[in-house]
Amino acid sequence: MDGNGRWAAKRALPRVAGHRAGAEAVRNTLRAAVEAGVEVLTLYAFSSENWRRSEEEVSDLKGLLRFYLDRELAELAREGVRLRLIGDHTAFGSDLVDRLELAVEVTRHNRKLTLVIALNYGSRSEIVGASRRLAEKAAKGEIDPAAVDEAAMAAELMTSDLPDLDLLIRTSGEKRLSNFLLWQAAYAELLFVDTLWPDFDKASFQAALHDFAARQRRFGGR
Ligand code: IPE
Ligand code: MG
């Protein structure tokens, strides 16, 4: 979800106003995804590199997350949305950790759509962690190193219970993956749009699905 800062700058507003508008855009996209029958929607909300931003901006982002969790939890539950987290959300402080974990707990039986929020997430560190756990198991003799295959690796990732990515959308004209789901996106269709995240709406999401539907996926076959 990129482009909040530029959206605000275009309007001579502080960056936090862009993040606030970005949070509103999340509601539209989530609704559009539920309507379209999407099974899993993953939002990259805060990367493990975003700590490099100013203390003020990090605190604004945390504040917004707290506000929206409180405001939206009932709606998520009502819409049949199950919340899942990836990344190390424990770095956000007990106040936010409690709210996040409550939201996961309250929505865990919902089946309509799984909303995955990537918080303090970085794909390389996820892969390193998974590799370390496999190495530890091998060192203890619990697994045979020769048995380490793609499935064994996938089972150690934070997304072990989720399907691979089908479509990856990056907003705001940037054309990078920025350490997002590198393993899981191996065969994802990539879509780069110029729209700044706060302007991304239901029509933008539907257009993305339309684009995806026209792609021919061969997964290395022909
Ligand atoms: C939102 O957009 C990304 C978050 C970390 C929430 P940016 O804050 O990266 O906006 P730009 O790239 O400065 O426009
Ligand atoms: Mg950015």
Image: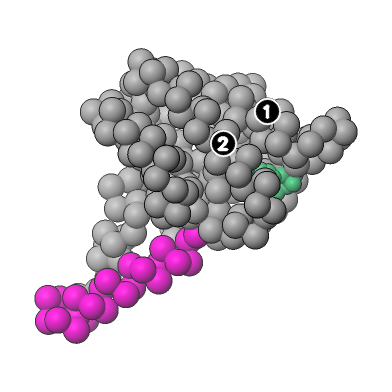
Secondary structure under tag 1 reads helix
Find out whether residue 126 is within the magenta segment: yes
Residue 102 visible, this orientation: yes
- Quarter residue 196 falls in: top right
214 or 99: which is nearer to us?
99
- Quarter residue 22 falls in: top right
Residue 48 marker: none
Question: Which residue lies at the image location 84% right of the left edge and 38% below the top edge?
Answer: 9
- x and y, in percent, of residue 163 in the image: 35, 46
Looking at the rendering, in which quadrant would you find the N terminus?
Answer: top right
What kind of residue is marked 2?
Answer: Gly
Q: Is disc 2 in contact with disc 1, using a CB cutoff of under 8 Å? A: no
- Assign the magenta stretch its main secondary structure: helix
Question: Which residue lies at the image location 69% right of the left edge and 53% below the top edge?
Answer: 54
Residue 21 marker: 1
Other residues around mark 1 within 10 Å, as few (<14) / some (14–19) / many (≥20): some
Spatial CA distance of label 2 from label 1 is 14 Å
Q: Earlier in the sequence, mark 2 or mark 1?
A: 1
Q: Is residue 215 left or right of residue 146?
A: right
What kind of residue is marked 1?
Answer: Ala
- x and y, in percent, of residue 167 in the image: 52, 43
Other residues around mark 2 within 10 Å, as few (<14) / some (14–19) / many (≥20): few
Q: Is residue 62 above or below residue 149?
A: above
Q: Which residues are magenta?
A: 122-146
Question: Which residue lies at the image location 61% right of the left edge and 55% below the top edge?
Answer: 50
- x and y, in percent, of residue 132 in the image: 32, 75
Secondary structure under tag 2 reads helix
Residue 63 marker: 2
Q: Is residue 200 left or right of residue 85?
A: right
Find out whether residue 14 is within the magenta segment: no
